[in-house]
Amino acid sequence: MLGSPGCFIFIFLLCQLTGPAASRTRKELVGALGGAVTFPLNHSVNEIDSIIWIFNTTTLVTIQPNMPDGQANIIVTQNRNKERVGFLQGSYSMILSKLKKKDSGVYRVEIHSSSLQHPFTQEYGLQVYEFIEEKKRTDNQQETLNYNPPSGETAEYDTVSHLNKTVPEENLVNTFYATVQIPPKMEKHDSLPTSPDTPKLYTYENVT
């Protein structure tokens, strides 16, 4: 009993997808701006005629591994990429260095072989990020002591600086001092009693 034509078509498509030339799942890669990234290439193709690395729709590198002299012929299509493209020793996994933001995108490698009906393909997605180091901040703040002198007095305030440094003799009690000086001359007011002109020392607790 012969099967339906639809069954034969399904089996044909299944055989095409299960061969070694079937496309793999895209591999997502991340690179740092100015750094390097490796595109790992794993395959089981024995007789390789050529390997082509493609970025979006632009051919980056064409490799002919089986040359008469035993050396691979590597052709980088764009001069600006010649110093940026390399390969792992004993492998055709591509290394892209001096990464730029515009290097983000889709990469694809194709392995062509006379033993394969369709080329072996592998896709990669690359995202290039800029890593920003958090700037160190020095906490150096100045505070002015708020003191309202009685009417007729003029106060001078000392500025107290809080630095990220430890002062052993003062840090033990967590206290700072400010001197408020009253000048020897006072404005004359009939409603105010006369008092001796004496400097005063005020101590303020630093409550944290």
Image: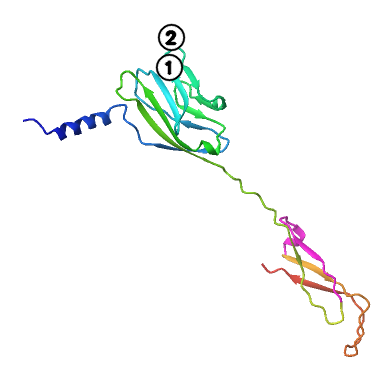
Q: Is residue 165 above or below residue 109?
A: below
Q: Secondary structure at mark 2?
A: loop
Residue type indicated by callout 2: Pro
Image point (36%, 36%), residue name: 25
Is 100 on the left or on the right of 138, as rendered? Answer: left
- Left or right: where does residue 185 sit relative to residue 173? right
Give the residue displayed 91% in from the left and 90% down from the top.
190
- Residue at (82, 66) in percent of width and height: 158
Whether residue 37 can be seen here: yes
Amino acid type shown at disc 1 = Pro
Q: Quadrant of residue 118?
A: top left
Count of labels in the image: 2
Foreground pick, 197 / 124 = 124
Q: Which mark is residue 68?
A: 2
Point out the residue furthest to the right here.
185
Q: Give, as a single range, the part of the protein colored magenta.
A: 154-173
The main secondary structure of the magenta stretch is loop
SS class, disc 1: loop
Instruction: Give percent across and percent down for residue 43.
Output: 36, 26
Q: Residue 99: image x %, image y %?
A: 55, 34
Let me know if residue 162 is in the magenta part.
yes
Whether residue 9 is situated above or below residue 158 in the rendered picture: above
Please state which of residues 166 and 119 is positioned toward the viewer in this rendering: 119
* Residue, disc 1: 65
